[in-house]
Structure formats: C-alpha cells, structure tokens
Amino acid sequence: MTAALLAGLASGLEELSAAGQRRVRRTLESPQGPRVVVDGRELLSFASNDYLGLANHPDVIAAVRDGAARWGAGAGASHLVCGHFAPHEALEDELARFVRPSAGARALVFSSGYLANLAILTALAGRSDAIFADRLDHACLNDGALLSRAELVRYPHRDVQALSRRLAASTAKRKLIATDAVFSMDGDLAPLAELCALAERHDAWLVVDDAHGFGVLGTGDDSGRGTLAHVGLESERVVYMGTLGKAAGVSGAFVAAHPLVIDTLLQTARSYVFTTAVPPFIAAALEKSVAIIRDDRARRAHLFALVARFRERMRPLPWMLRESFTPIQPIVVGANSVAVEVAGELWRRGFWVPAIRPPTVPKGTARLRVSLSAAHRVADVDALVETLAELVPAFAHRDQQTSAASTADCDRIK
C-alpha cells in the first residue's frame, strides 16, 4: 500500500516537471540584499521583495539584537494566553496611527500575511455570506474565502462593471469584496476608489491586501503609508492587511481597521487565537523599520528613480513588460519553457531573476519577475538591461504562447 501511495506522489511530481511547473528551492549563504551568495554562487539579485533594502539594515539589525537581549527569543504562547508583550502593543499602536484606514483605527499583528488574510475572511464571513474576489488575488485570499464557507464569487481582473453586476445579483446576507492592492505578479493597482464605492452601494466590507504597497506607495506627507494613502482612500468599510516581511524587511503582518473589526478578529479569528505570538524582539525590530519607512523618503525616491530607469532602458527591446510603476516589473514571455530557459541563462551570467509560471500566473503568461529594491544601484539596473539585450537574438522572438486576452493590458515599451 505504501508503495502505491508513493508512486502516486512520484507521478504527480513528474507531471509538474513535464509541464515546466516544478519549483526549485535555492539556499542563500549571505544576508538578503542586491548581491547575494546562493547555492555557492555570488549573484546580483532581482528576486527579493525587500523593496526598501531594510532586511539587512544596520539599525534594524541593532533593534533585533537589543530586543532579544531585553525580551528574549520567544513569545512563549499565543497573544491571548501570555504571549502579548509591550513591543507588540507599541507596534500595533504605531501601525494603526501610520496607516489610518479610518479614523480611530486599531491594528493587530500576525505571524504572516497568509494567517492575517485567513483571519479576516473567516471572522467576517460565513455560510450565508458571499466573498467577491479579483481573479488575480493572492492564494491566501482565495483560501480564506474557502475556509469561511461563504460563497466565493470571482470577477475578471480589475473589472469594476463585472463586479457590480455580481454584487447586484447576490442575495447573500453579508458581502465582502477582497482584493490585492498591488498585484504581486503584475505590479498593477486595484481600482480601490471604485471598489469602495461599490462596497458603500452594496453595504459590503472592502478587504485590501496591501502586501506589496505598504512602505512603498503614498505621496507627500503620506509617503510610505501604502496604497490607500496613494489613492486618498479612507473608510470604515476598509479592512487593511499589510505585510512586514517585504518593504518592512523583517517578518509578520498586521490588520488595521475599525476597532470593532479588530476586536472581532482578536476574539474569533482562529489563525490569531490559536497561534503562538511573533517573538517580541521581532516586534521591537519592526518599530525601527516603521520609523525608517516613515522618515526616510529618500529611499523611496531612489527606488522609483530605478523603476523609471529600468522601464526607459527596456524601451528599445522587444521584451513585453506589464504596465506597472511599482518595483514589480514582470517581463512576460508566454511559454513556461522559455521563461525557465531565460532565467537559467541569466543565472549563468550572474543574475537571479525568477521565472514565474502557472498556477502562480495564468496559463500562457509565464514571466520573469524583476523586483527592484532601494538597495540596488543604477549600475545594477543597467547591467541587467544590457544582459537582457544580449539575450534578445536567442529568446525574444521564440514562440510566445500568450493569448490576445492575457496580453491586452501589457505594454510592449515601444
């Protein structure tokens, strides 16, 4: 019997390999940064979500060291037993003030963004309810919707009119609209103002996953506050989730919302109630990260200058870029095999740019996901573009299996 079970697993893995969808885990032998040692090789990395270069920032490292000396290595229990420390409380207060999705909002810290989204959707929706999700939402929003036992209604990517029709046709007791703010594999933004207007019209919650916007987006005095601030949105209907392991450079996530929403999560969300708290030294380090995000606007200015330079330097090349002004710059190649081969050739030439394939992205839209960081230099971006230009004769005109529908929102940068 065991042999048959193992044979079934082996067959499934072989199918993934044949489809060009089998993943490979790399081992870093250096701190996170633009230059890393991985699997014994020194590479220029465009693979990380460390958008502001805080993962190896000396002040954050010092806060980790000081926090561990002051508070110890572990929390010891869940927040509701005996694992909620003063640094957790201080971090939650600071995050609520900084993000401000609505007046008087509170925040709740989680061990990961995945757990945070599970908490939101399972606590705010149930069997008689409906969750309306963008078709390109992150997997954890879909999983949270399924675990909630609510009806999951998906709408075409960023299609406000289609969502409006689905909301109007629904007889659900409660309705939630769930969306990424910055879509992780495309770099485009959700139409948050229009989604909030629909939430008002249909008396729904608007759940916003800002994993890739927090710390990065926002303008003027709101710089770094995230995508809500970037579009000028504030509403008691918004339930905001931001991650703390990307732009913040450390680990974990948080939810910020109306105090009644936060108390509901604290009391009923299983992925909060039954999980050991984040170590208090992590919370102490994140206080330092948030302070840097709030005060060091030059980092974001440099980051967006790099984004503009990358797109401008890519303009003469035939590679297909998504329409994105964020640090996420996907190069769509279409076929899984081509994405893997180009990523492999870049690797051999000293660049780490991951190939992203289905099911992470829709079939026929395999891509290279270029992720820029404030820790990169202009010379780093130029070196990547120059290497891509060298690869054009071998790869750029290979059979691209991308359908017209899936490339309609692509910008060929001509």
Image: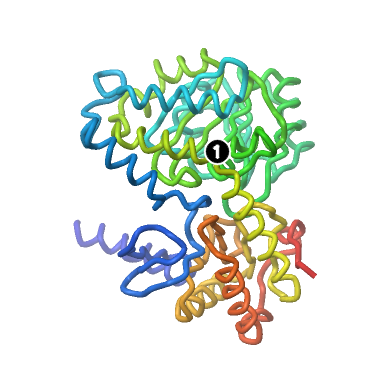
Q: Which image quarter is the N terminus in?
A: bottom left
Q: Is residue 175 visible?
A: no
296 horizontally vs 16: left or right: right
* Residue 213 percent across, percent down from the top left: 59, 42
* Residue 388 percent across, percent down from the top left: 61, 77
Q: Is residue 29 visible?
A: yes
Q: Secondary structure at mark 1?
A: helix
Q: How is the image coloured?
A: rainbow
231 horizontally vs 291: left or right: right
In the image, 218 versus 353, the foreground residue is 218
117 horizontally vs 13: left or right: right
Which residue is labeled 1 in the image?
A: 295
Residue 13 in the image: above or below residue 206:
below
- Residue at left 58%, top 71%? 379
- Residue at left 65%, top 80%? 389
* Residue 45 percent across, percent down from the top left: 47, 66
Residue 26 in the image: above or below residue 290:
below
Determine crowd level at label 1: few under 14, some 14-19, many 20+ residues with C-alpha closer than 10 A. Answer: few
- Residue at left 57%, top 66%? 368
